[in-house]
Amino acid sequence: MVGFDVGRKLKELREKKRFTIRELSRRSGVSTTQISEIERNLSAPTVPTLMRIISSLDTHASIFFEEKEERKVCVVRKSNRQEFIDRKNNVFVESLTEGITGTNLKVIVAHPPPGSINIRGGYVHRGEELIYVIKGRIRVTLGEEEYILDEGDTIHFRGMIRHTIANITDREVELISVTAPPNY
């Protein structure tokens, strides 16, 4: 797994916006204690927590992976994918895109276990999203509408529609999620 300093970068972003930890806590709904621990690298945020903090800072997660030198091409080998664990939902996530400076695209492979729902109550983000089911069956809820997707199916939607993604099988599902612009 490629290493990076989330805490240092988060603190830089917060200070650049001239937010105190308390102000960032108020805006994100994440406790001041948790933000402080993340900034000091004493704890790692879950993906939903990091997404709430990033949204409060009006930026996107790709900023954690940008390098100083502009990169126009980046090959991500399977053995070097950036990996995340959404601890709340126990979902293993791998980044397929990283390293290109200022990108407007993020692609991940997610492996939700049986019965998992990405964010209870739904999630809203700017831009758009496309989901491709590699293995298994999922239910995508967009507002009041539900869509069942099987292997090989895709769904493309505006991120401003409140949405959830649920594994409705008794096995791990594998899916690709493409977001533009990046939201984690």
Image (cartoon, helix red, strand yellow):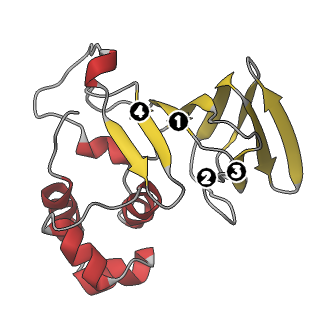
For numbered disc 3, what is the local secondary structure? loop
Mark yes or no: residue 182 visible: no
Q: Determine whether, in the image, residue 159 is placed left or right of residue 36.
A: right
- N-terminal of the two: label 4 or label 3? 4
Label 2 or label 1, whichever comes before in sequence order: 1
**Residue 25 makes an appearance in the image:** yes
**Residue that label 3 marks:** 115
Which of the 4 image quarters holds residue 143? bottom right
Residues packed near mark 3 inside 10 Å, few (<14), some (14 to 19) or many (20 plus) = some
Disc 4 target residue: 94
Report which quarter residue 10 is drawn in: bottom left
Q: Amino acid at mark 4?
A: Glu
Give whichever of 169, 38 is nearer the camera. 169
Q: Amino acid under label 2?
A: Asn
Residue under pointer 2: 118
Whether label 4 touches label 3, CB < 8 Å: no
In the picture, measured across the screen, residue 32 lies left or right of residue 163, that is left
Which element type, helix, strand or loop, lies under badge 4?
strand
- Closer to the chain start, of discs 2 and 4, is 4
Disc 3/disc 1 C-alpha distance (Å): 14 Å
Question: In the image, what residue occupies the spot 27% across and 16% down?
Answer: 74
Category of crowding for the residue at label 1, using alpha-carbon neighbours closer than 10 angstroms: few (below 14), some (14–19), many (at least 20): many
- Say if 174 sits above or below 71 in the image: below
Crowding at label 4, few (<14), some or many (≥20) Cα neighbours within 10 Å? some
Using a 10 Å C-alpha cutoff, classify the residue at mark 2 as few (fewer than 14 neighbours), some (14 to 19) or many (20 or more): many
Amino acid type of the residue tagged 3 in the rendering: Gly
Label 2 – label 3 distance at C-alpha: 10 Å
In x, y percent, where is residue 180?
52, 35
